[in-house]
Amino acid sequence: MRIVTRPDFDGIVCAVLLREALHIDTDIYWVEPNEVQKKKADIKPGDILANLPYDPRCSLWFDHHVSNKPEQAFEGAHEIVDSAAGVIHKYYKTSGHLDSRFDDLVFHTDIIDSASLTKDQVLHPQDYPYVLLSMTIKNRDNTDTAYWNRLVKMLRTRDIETVMADPIVRERCDIVIRENKAYSGYLKEYTRIQGQISVTDFRGLDPVPSGNRFLTYCLFPETVASVKLRYTEPEKTHVLVSIGHSIFNRNCRVNVGQLLAGYGGGGHIGAGGCTLEANDAQQKIDEIIQVLEVNEPVWLTRFF
């Protein structure tokens, strides 16, 4: 039995809950959604997938993304709620395999994964431990596996104050705070506004700057959605497209998960991503931005 999840805060908390509820001590298999969608992930019978698209080879599946629900029957649970961790928490708390010890952790995971943040939390994450901790979780080339595993172990047995005092966590938090200060400048320089959409193009930068993904909504308050573009690897053969509804100007009516499912990606109503081959990426990016600019949910049916 093996936990298979993605390396973001929701995925890490999913792993915490599954290890606690099912007493699993095998290594966690960390993968990205795109790897599951393209059958590149090595999914096996007995695997428990969480916060990822469904794969029929797994034995249990838990998720909350609107674009991921399969047509066939499956073991596990799928609900359109704030986090996959919330789905798992409800499932195993109902069966008595989890108690209230993780209620606060799941509460904050819901806030973070659904982007139900205040402007103060976005501008000053250092004042909010769970928010700052979530920003230390990054995935560029799987070099952070030991850190993800460390967080799973600590969040399962320690309170948030003890976790934040850990020297490795504290060092990463300091880096995040410094990166966020610089990120504002990168956003201002590399973002253009198309109608009510901000388009941040980092394809010309190596390395790609890291920073608070919600900061764009504070810098460009007139926009209803953001598009961020970057290459996924040094060879520049694929472009990662990340889209989000503004968490403060909530007037975007496009279902992002549904839109990006048409390009081999997916996600939630308000956020998602897809990976495009670089040779024809710009045409598809232009199409995606056009849908966002039109901002009509019924237009998706006509578009596809």
Image: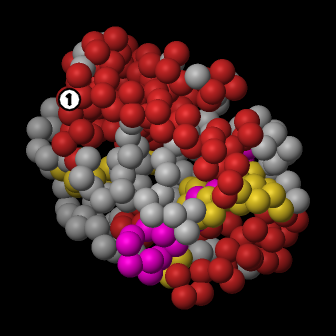
In the rendered image, residue 95 lying in the magenta stretch gets the answer no
Q: Residues within 10 Å of mark 1 (few under 14, many from 20)?
A: some
Picture coordinates of residue 225 (x, y %)? Answer: 75, 51
Q: Which residue is mark 1?
A: 153
Secondary structure at badge 1 equals helix
- The magenta span reads 231-246
Q: Amino acid at mark 1?
A: Lys
Picture coordinates of residue 241 (x, y %)? Answer: 58, 65
Residue placed most toward the observer, 217 or 190: 190
- Is any part of residue 23 visible from this angle? yes
Look at the picture and state if 144 lies above or below 120: below
In the rendered image, residue 242 lying in the magenta stretch gets the answer yes
Picture coordinates of residue 126 (x, y %)? Answer: 49, 21
Look at the picture and state if 49 lies above or below 146: below
Farthest-out residue, bottom:
279
In percent of the image, x 83 and y 62: which residue is there? 194
Count of residue discs? 1
